Image (spheres, helix red, strand yellow):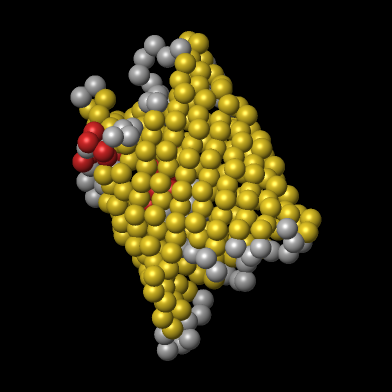
Amino acid sequence: MKTTSLFTLLVLLLASAPTKAQITLQAEHFGTSRYGDENNNEFGNSKGSAAVYQANVKIPISMTINKDSLAVVWGVALSGSYAVLTNKNFTQNMVPSEIVNAQFSLFNMRPLNKKWNMLLFAGAGIYTDQTQISKMGVRSVLGNAGAVFIKKMNSKLDLGAGLAFNNTFGYPMLFPALYLNYNAPGRYIFKVSLMSGFQASAGYEINKSFILSLIADMNGQMALVEKEGKDVIFTHQYIVTGLRPEIRIGKKITLPITLGISAVRPAYFTDRTLKSLFSSTNQYQFQSSFYAAAQINYKFY
């Protein structure tokens, strides 16, 4: 199975998963590395680096308390990413130079009882390799909606599953939707999240203003474009690991900085068909490289 395409698709489906109301800005840098297939057979002398800029805003717009004294929350989620792919020595159109992703979602978190919640979400987004609005076609627009049932296993762990649909392959289709959030605060801090990409970290709180963590993240972008007269999907995904010092400024602002490696950075075109999702051909990728990222988070409360 082409797991990178599947993961990127599931990330887009759950991009509206609610977290605390906050704004996040992030810049990532991927060093230069060779380009080849999944068996590390290089594609000529092709190589490349990348920079990814992201912004996410999640804001509850309504909160009411039901008869069981549990909160019903309506909110909006806005997200956008701009990837600049610097490609060298390519003799074929294997990797675009830019990717733009932008999405808007409306979500509703509704408690069913003290243990179970239901997350409903609906939205739309554009996923393209064009930066000019006049060149962005309808083929690059995705709509999505879904429902996820989430159980609070204990004070640290929430698990959920459900169904979501979008039109990635040109027509509405159902996909599984998974929800995972594990947060164990304290002097030693452990986190695992599958709400916006995949994030895992193990950290130590040196003091109230500084945390040092070992992290592993997985994320990516997608472009729905036309190539050689066919509708295709370009997948850009990355798996990174490294050290992340995080500075806290008061109760609302955090400044995480990550230094490490990008273990692998898949980047390839596939046909925009369901069959291609399970194909094992043409899985090209950039090899491991240096990775650095800087982020700022602002919590509204």
Identity of the residue drawn at 67% across and 57% down: 248
Report which quarter residue 278 is drawn in. top left
- For the question of whether residue 112 can be seen, the reply is no
Rendering coords of residue 190 (x, y %): 68, 57
Which residue is most to the bottom?
67
Rendering coords of residue 46 (x, y %): 48, 15
Count of numbered marks: 0
Judge from the rendering whether residue 98 lies leftward or rightward of residue 31; answer left or right: left
Identity of the residue drawn at 44% across and 56% down: 57
Report which quarter residue 186 is drawn in. bottom right
Judge from the rendering whether residue 51 lies leftward or rightward of residue 61; answer left or right: right
200 w.r.t. 283: above or below: below
The one of 236 and 250 positioned closer to us in this rendering = 250
Rendering coords of residue 265 (x, y %): 52, 31
- For the question of whether residue 152 can be seen, the reply is yes
Rendering coords of residue 272 (x, y %): 28, 35
The one of 295 and 155 positioned closer to us in this rendering = 295
Quadrant into which the N terminus falls: top left
Which residue is most to the front?
250
Report which quarter residue 99 is drawn in. top left
Identity of the residue drawn at 49% across and 26% down: 285
Judge from the rendering whether residue 156 lies leftward or rightward of residue 8; answer left or right: right
44 w.r.t. 69: above or below: above
180 w.r.t. 129: above or below: below
Judge from the rendering whether residue 138 lies leftward or rightward of residue 19; answer left or right: left
Quadrant into which the C terminus falls: bottom right
The one of 202 and 135 positioned closer to us in this rendering = 135
Identity of the residue drawn at 66% across and 63% down: 250
